């Protein structure tokens, strides 16, 4: 498994692979901002927007690649923050394809992102995830602190409400 950062051009060139990971996660029940059935082209449009954000310098995109070099996981560090928050960044879209889950992919992505955040001088990271999700266990294992839960925050891809837990980490 290889973890690395993509620039905007490479992210754009690999939109189909990124979309496949997103599609797999949503079809597997992950509440990551999309509903079932996924509209044709919706995942690709999302990743084109992310690639533009990377190219503009407001986001860093990390991917996990399997032995064949195919993208099987993603994680973003969003650094485009308000003027009064230059020390902070958001963590977004940790997605791991079901075929490689429970192999340490999420942990490796998160550790790589944290190193980049430190390099950039970020001292406070923030994220949210479905309360009690597999991702929450990864965050807690890596010493992220719960800030609180919000009930009925979002919808699961098939429609029911879910709560979200906000986490933070001081670097």
Image (spheres, helix red, strand yellow):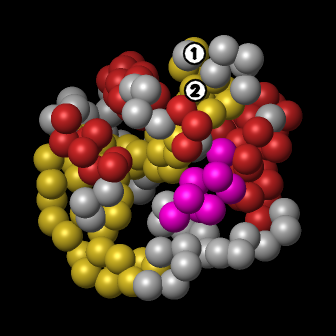
Location of the N terminus (image quadrant): top right
Q: Is residue 108 above or below residue 20?
A: above
What percent of the width, then of the height, locates residue 51?
72, 43
Question: Which residue position is annotated with label 2?
Answer: 64
The stretch in magenta equals 21-29
Question: Which residue position is annotated with label 1?
Answer: 2
Verify whether residue 22 appears in magenta.
Answer: yes
Location of residue 9 (image quadrant): top right
Q: Residue at x 47, y 75 (%)?
A: 156
Q: Is residue 160 above or below residue 10?
A: below
Left or right: residue 13 compared with residue 69: right
What percent of the width, then of the height, locates residue 12?
81, 39
Nearest to the observer: residue 58 or residue 66: 66
Left or right: residue 18 compared with residue 135: right
Q: Residue at x 41, y 56 (%)?
A: 82
Left or right: residue 76 compared with residue 88: right
């Amino acid at each position: 498994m290889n973890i690395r950062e993509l620039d905007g051009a490479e992210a754009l060139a690999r939109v189909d692979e990124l979309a496949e990971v997103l599609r797999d996660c949503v079809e597997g029940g992950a509440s990551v901002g999309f509903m079932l059935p996924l509209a044709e082209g919706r995942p690709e449009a999302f990743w084109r927007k992310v690639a533009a954000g990377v190219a503009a310098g407001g986001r860093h995109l990390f991917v996990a690649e399997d032995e064949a070099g195919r993208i099987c996981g993603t994680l973003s560090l969003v650094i485009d923050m308000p003027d009064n928050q230059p020390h902070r960044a958001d963590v977004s879209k940790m997605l791991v394809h079901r075929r490689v889950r429970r192999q340490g992919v999420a942990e490796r992505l998160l550790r790589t992102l944290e190193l980049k955040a430190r390099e950039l001088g970020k001292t406070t990271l923030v994220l949210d995830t479905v309360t009690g999700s597999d991702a929450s266990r990864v965050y807690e294992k890596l010493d992220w602190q719960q800030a609180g839960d919000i009930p009925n925050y979002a919808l699961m891809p098939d429609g029911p409400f879910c709560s979200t837990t906000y986490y933070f980490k001081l670097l």
